[in-house]
Image (tube, rainbow, N blue to C red):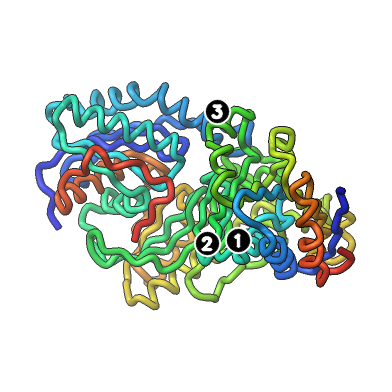
Amino acid sequence: MMEMAVLTTKGAQETEAIGEAVGSQLRVGDLVVLTGDLGAGKTTFAKGLARALGVTQRVTSPTFTIVQEYEGRVPVAHVDVYRLDRIQELHDLGFEELLEGRVTVVEWGEAIALVLPRERIDVRIAMDGAGDGDDDLRVVEIVATGPGWDDRRPALEAALAPFGDA
Amino acid sequence: MVVSRVRVLGIETSCDETAAAVVDDGRQVRSSVVASQADLHARYGGVVPEIASRAHVELICDVIEQALVEAGSSLHELDAVAAVRGPGLAGALLVGVSAAKAISLASRLPYVAVHHHEAHLYAAMIEDPQLEPPLVTLIVSGGHTLLIAMDGHGRYRVLGETVDDAAGEAFDKVARFLGLGYPGGPAIDRLAREGDPEAIRFPRPMRAEGHDFSFSGLKTAVVQYVRKHPEADVADVAASFQAAVVDVLVDKLLAAARETGIDTVVAGGGVAANSVLRERLLDLAVAGEVRVVLPSVALCTDNAAMVAAVGAYRLAADGPTPLEAPVVPNLRLV
């Protein structure tokens, strides 16, 4: 039900490639929640994800505008919620409507996880915590939750298989 | 292009400054009032959109009133009212644009919608009233990092922009990581004076690669360094980080000037208030590399004088903007 893929990446390019693999499995209405410290590679992951959905525009940090929308084969909304003060502001953003017609990627979504739909993919990117290894190493955990993913999980796992022990 | 005998009220609410100004003939500032909300956003480490919108609503009438009083002008002595319609935060932009439209309707004044980046360009023309295009401009702020060639009034080419984080965003995020508070630019600038800019050799991303910028990797490098060296002097980290950003900005601006053959460069946006960047740009001018027009700090950071200035040009070139025109949070310059 909640199998988790735990992948190790050796740099930004690989993080982006995993984003692309996840993106290849997404369709309108899907939600991806990205968590990780400053510099972990959340936006890098989102770049790959958006490319897989046919976005050709440049995907940049959504921190300033909170929401960046992109046109692709499937439209993509890239959201950064870490400064949102209250859950109410999520409603003010029109978050519920945002989810409907596109794939939505939320950075720093952990804080609002309780009000997010259960039907989603959680991606947690961890930097090499000890600080004694390779600076570029990242551990990427990917979990698809909600009954809607039961049928789709095998395809997601297959897409992630090239990256390791998925 | 000559804009004569035009008095414009400018309004700027695209981010976290509520500003109004009265400018004559596109270049003579009669008043410029800026109410900063930075204190309201400090504990969040960045601008919170909902708080910004509410603060704009609370401040806008007083700020406009103050600008008119300081200018010694009444509404009926104005020729137009201009407001920034993008890019910026949707809820914040709406406050200034709605105020401008209301004044336009009530006082039967033409309304002019302007672009925030174009306004930053015109700040240089307030600083130097003789300044005319062509120019190469570096616009660097919390939300934007752009290199623009201005070939003539209203004729722009975007030469480069950030592929990930804006320069000011890197300052804000690194400052937050180092526990220096918000806004990050002034905090790092201040602390860096006590540090050694050569203490740590941080990367200069894409320094010699085209006109685009990348600051995400530099931010990550700072985070990694501090994690590995928790004993590192924070002032050294701040100074070394700032030096890396400034090196990239200066090199890119100079390269753009050389490549376009345009010999006048201009800087604008909040990061253009950075003291080391300003010193380095002035060094370029002293060395005779390029002519540098560096607006005062008050004209670099968000203000409404630049909005009124560009409003005068836009009115002369395009006429009034229809009141139905909406705000455009992701508005592009070209």
**Amino acid type at image mark 2:** Gly
Residue B283's place in the image compared with A98, above or below, is: below
- Residue B106 found in image quarter: top left
Q: Are marks 2 and 3 on the same chain?
A: no
Q: Are marks 1 and 3 on the same chain?
A: no
What residue would you read off at disc 3? Answer: B40
In space, the residues marked 2 and 3 are separated at their CA atoms by 37 Å
The chain ID associated with circle 1 is: A
Closer to the camera in the image, A34 or B270: A34
**Mark 1 touching mark 3, by CB under 8 A?**
no
Residue at the image position 46 percent from the left and 48 percent from the top: B273
Residue underneath mark 2 = A72
Q: Secondary structure at mark 1?
A: helix
Q: Which residue is mark 1?
A: A50
Residue B187 visible: yes
Which chain is disc 2 placed on?
A
Pair 1/3: label in front: 1
Cα distance, mark 1 to mark 3?
Answer: 34 Å
At label 3, which amino acid type do we have? Answer: Leu
Q: Amino acid at mark 1?
A: Ala
- Residue that appears at 44% across and 34% down: B91
Q: Is residue B298 above or below residue B33?
A: below
Do the numbered discs 1 and 2 sit on residues whose CB atoms are within 8 Å? yes
Q: Earlier in the sequence, mark 1 or mark 2?
A: 1
